[in-house]
Amino acid sequence: MKTLICLILTCLTASHTFGQARPGAYLWTLNLKVVDDNNQPVSDAKTWVAYGDPKQGQSPDPFQTNDWAIAGLTDTNGLFIAKHIDHSWSIGIQVQKTGYYSILESYELYKPGQFDDRKVAANRNPTLTLTLKKIDKPIQMYAKSLNTHVPDLDKPVGYDLMVGDWIAPYGTGLNADINFTGHFDKRDGGESDFTLTVTFPKPGDGIQEFTVPDSEKSSALRSPHEAPAEGYKAEWVQFDNRKPKTPTKTNKDANRNYFFRVRTVTDDRGNIVSAHYGKIYGDFMRFDYYLNPTSNSRNIEFDPKQNMMTNLKPDEGVSAP
């Protein structure tokens, strides 16, 4: 429940950054459809749509009488309709059902420049489809949140995903799972280019990007339950080109996600005998990584209560599955 309240406050705070006068009270209507991993309707899912936040002394339970949210269950077709007349800039949506990962979503009822009364209807009748992903087989994994930089330039520096550190002499790592090579070129006039090349030490190791569908972006589990068996590339190049008074050119994306395969062992014909699979949320060098400790298992559904990484600092912990 605290998570929902935080979401509501975040939505309202973000909306105020528009720097506009408070809009008038208008009707909004949300038509929501909730489906499962197989795109089948999910009935009887607890759903609430918050258009405010609980006042002091009010119950934070949206299923009790309140004046800050509309609550109920999805019908047999997975549908839930909420409507209200208020001054809200945005609404917060939460969906829960036993056996599924919860959904936390926000929706802007206005966009910058839409505070004109003639434009208020533009976003106030949304139709959304959200996916409740099933809780299948959460497992223990090596998981860590990183915000770092390559400790040396113009040479590959290995990172050990199980130890959670750079390879010696830059850290305590023992096996290079991923190599990072940074190159920085600084020129006169404030221009600079930075290239980060991500490579892998063993044949068969590699990485591939994956995209989260819009209907799943608000799920607690953003990734698929399993990593793919094929499609891994041995190299990924990230660039960042800067010039004064010019927008930075980069392919870096904080919302990017990856699958990866490491510690691959192949036979004399190049066939994979064993390998370890994992996933990355975010982009280099600020990202969360998850590594399955079991060879040949492609399960990447993490149980946050079973992190095999020890002695993590507070900002290195991972809570998302």
Image: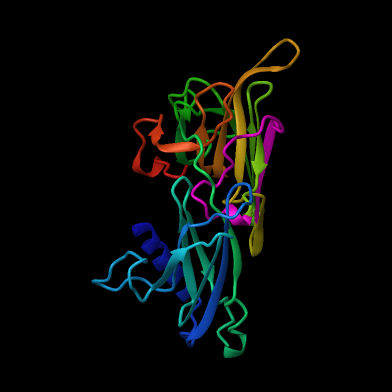
> Is 44 left or right of 111, judged from the image as shown?
left
Instruction: Indicate the colouring scheme.
Output: rainbow
In front here: 20 or 30? 30
Q: Is residue 234 magenta?
A: yes
Where residue 68 appears, x then y in whole percent?
38, 74
Residue located 49% across and 34% down the image: 137
Q: Is residue 48 visible?
A: no
> Is 173 left or right of 41, judged from the image as shown?
left
Instruction: For the N terminus, give its image quadrant.
Output: bottom left
Where residue 13 appears, x then y in whole percent?
42, 70
**Farthest left residue in view:** 57
Dominant SS type (magenta):
loop
Q: Eyeballing the image, is 124 above or below 44? A: below
> Is 51 left or right of 201, judged from the image as shown?
left
**Farthest right residue in view:** 269
Q: Is residue 107 visible?
A: yes
Residue located 38% across and 57% down the image: 3
In front here: 91 or 207? 91
Where residue 208 appears, x then y in whole percent?
67, 37
Residue located 52% across and 52% down the image: 219
Number of callouts:
0
Q: Eyeballing the image, is 116 above or below 307? A: below
* Magenta-tinted stretch: 214-242
Q: Is residue 16 magenta?
A: no
In front here: 45 or 89? 45
Where residue 54 appears, x then y in whole percent?
32, 71
